Image (cartoon, rainbow, N blue to C red):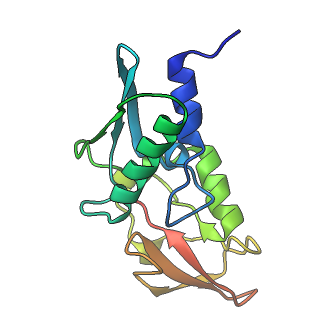
């Protein structure tokens, strides 16, 4: 059976990787909010992971170019700011990809409001729970820096928000 336009667009979007975490697709990251059509013209709504995220311009361009290359004419890319993006929107596959890449995925739900000092973040390298918060901020503002006290490796933790 032939894939629908909707399926084709979602497959294209699933192949676009986040520029900051190149193993995580924008679909698994949860920033693609919807795919709609005006006849055969795709309208893609995306939500930044935080207000002013510099990657959104690159992501918008990648979405537009990928759709144009696939034969979709004049795709519309809309940035939606509400509701705000939350780590709850990261897919289970996305969380597994983060861990395999060496970034500890978010623990719990964003509305739980746990403090970083109060959570146990397993090491993505050795799975030890004997870890220590080093800094509230890691390689980007959405991550915190931890260190495993067993394997001694530092690692980023993708903070809940």
| Placement of 153 over or under 1, stated as above or below | below
- Residue 138 placed where, x, y %? 46, 81
Locate the C terminus by quadrant.
bottom left
Locate the N terminus by quadrant.
top right
Nearest the viewer among 112 and 49 is 49
- Tell me if residue 108 can be seen: yes
Going by the image, does 86 lie left or right of 127? left
Residue drawn 40% across and 58% down?
Answer: 58
Going by the image, does 123 lie left or right of 43? right
| Placement of 7 over or under 19, stated as above or below | above
Residue drawn 66% across and 71% down?
Answer: 102
- Tell me if residue 161 can be seen: no
Residue 11: image quadrant is top right
Nearest the viewer among 9 and 100 is 9
- Residue 137 placed where, x, y %? 41, 81
Count of numbered badges drawn on the protein: 0
Residue drawn 68% across and 88% down?
Answer: 149
Residue drawn 38% across and 31% down?
Answer: 34
Nearest the viewer among 30 and 153 is 30
Going by the image, does 59 lie left or right of 13? left
- Residue 75 placed where, x, y %? 36, 33
| Placement of 135 over or under 29, stated as above or below | below
């Amino acid at each position: 059976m032939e894939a629908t336009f909707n399926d084709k667009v979602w497959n294209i979007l699933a192949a676009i990787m986040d520029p900051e975490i190149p193993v995580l697709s924008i679909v698994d990251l949860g920033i693609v909010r919807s795919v709609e059509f005006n006849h055969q013209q795709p309208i893609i709504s995306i939500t930044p992971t935080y207000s002013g995220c510099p990657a959104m311009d690159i992501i918008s361009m990648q979405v537009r170019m990928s759709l144009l290359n696939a034969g979709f004419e004049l795709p519309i890319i809309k940035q939606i700011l509400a509701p705000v993006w939350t780590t709850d929107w990261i897919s289970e596959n996305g969380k597994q990809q983060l861990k395999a890449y060496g970034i500890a995925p978010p623990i719990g739900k964003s509305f739980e409001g746990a403090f970083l000092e109060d959570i146990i973040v397993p090491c993505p390298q050795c799975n030890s729970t004997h870890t220590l918060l080093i800094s509230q901020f890691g390689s980007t503002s959405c991550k915190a820096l931890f260190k495993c006290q067993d394997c001694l490796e530092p690692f980023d933790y993708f903070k809940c928000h």
